[in-house]
Image: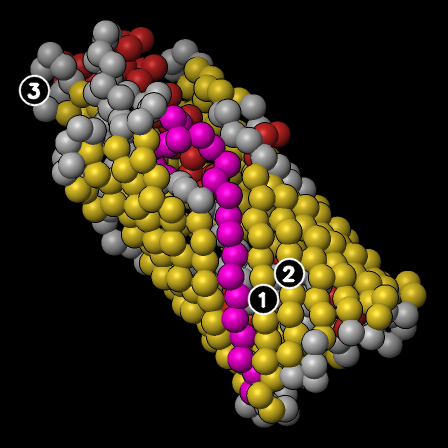
Amino acid sequence: MKRLLLTISVVFIAYSLQLYAGGFQQNQHGARAKALGGAFTALANDPSAIYWNGAGLTQFSGTRLMLGTHILAPASTFRGVAPSTTNYDMESQIFTPTHLFVSHTLDNGWAFGLGFTQPFGSGTKWGEDWVGKYIATETKLQTFVFLPTVAYEFYKGYSVSATLVYSFANVLIERMITQFPFEGDAKISLDGDAGSAFGYNFGLMGKPLDWLTFGFSLRSEVEYNFEGTATTTGSEVLAANFPKGDITATLVTPMNITGGIAAVITDQIILSMDYQWVGWSSYDVLAVEFADFDDVSSPREYKDSYILRFGAQYQYNENFALLGGVYFDKMPVETELLNPSLPDSDRLGFSFGVNAQITEHFSLTGSYMFLRGEQTTVSDSKVNYYPITGSEAMFNGTYNSKANIFSLSLQYDF
């Protein structure tokens, strides 16, 4: 009984960390980039270049400060378990990832910047009595990064950059555990933190023609070593069999390599496009270690993925610009491994926004994105939603997901 309860609990933790990381890699790092669908690598023309492509900092002069936030409202439903057609709604939540960027460009081709943002910062929450309660009830992951950046224009119109990534994170994972053959359920909770994780970014920007710019960025993997506590509340009779105490786990976020181009079509119209490769296959196994129980590892079985981004800007007059974008994000995991800790899918996003120069030194950008996940039906699930010895109750059904994202960035040029 002790080994059964432990295995059930740890496998759940493993799947939750993997799936959550895959689908909620955020791209909320500035309202202008958001309005352009994230097709910003070859533009990088505001201080959020520190995240997107630090080489863009050499385009500026003087000191620039940007502060902003995003309001992220995800929603998901699950219909099943097949053949049932009962609908279950994920509980509503609002997330507000923030960003702060400051840059200073010298006259000799050097530029420096410092940024703060959240590459991961969302979650899912279901009821404690829904059909998937033994798989997931709540999952939340937040990562925070500081980005000291240096850039240099080594030839007219051509720049490179390097960024040190310093990051920390926190995670919360909860679900119910059956107490069969006893009545009622127990609840397991993992609450952990990871500090002092490091990575690096490199950027390149070039302008071979007056009307054409290209950009390249590389963001490295970052390894987070979580330390936390597992707690379980349930029957006192089974208390000794439930996992509890100190726990550690490692999560590696993937390398991202992005290439982009931007073209000035007319004096008023700029078009941009990015292709982003996401190296999810680099992470093979998630190992979970308990201080007082046997360690367990789980294969992650992700595959490399990609994101396509397109953006357009129309400069209405010298103080006002209209922005629009679209992007497609390919799901990095097979449907057989989907689980409600993250209802992942192929995703299509549509965005628009405005940029307004309010005074000589102050400007703002506001944007909205609608993100729609492709309806995903699972008929070959490997996730057992009623984990009793000998049972094979697989979590087959249909997921639908969407998100509304509102963004605002304020910029002051000194």
Magenta residues, start to end = 320-342
Q: To which residue does mark 3 refer?
A: 183
Residue 128 pos. (x, y %): 18, 36
- Is residue 113 something that shows in the picture? no
Residue at 82 percent across and 75 percent down: it is 210
Instruction: From this view, report whether residue 330 is shown above or below residue 39.
Output: above
Residue nearest the observer in this picture, 350 or 57 = 350
Q: Which residue type does callout 1 highlight?
A: Gly
The mark found on residue 294 in the picture is none
* Residue 4 in which image quadrant: top left
Residue at mark 3 to residue at mark 1: CA–CA distance: 56 Å
Q: Which residue type does callout 3 highlight?
A: Glu
Question: In the image, is 226 to the left or to the right of 127?
Answer: right
Q: To which residue does mark 1 refer?
A: 311
Residue 274 pos. (x, y %): 64, 56
The image's colour scheme reads: secondary structure
The mark found on residue 273 in the picture is 2
User: Between tags 3 and 2, which lies in front?
Assistant: 2
Mark with earlier residue (3, 1): 3
- Label 2 environment density (alpha carbons within 10 Å; few <14, some 14–19, many ≥20): many
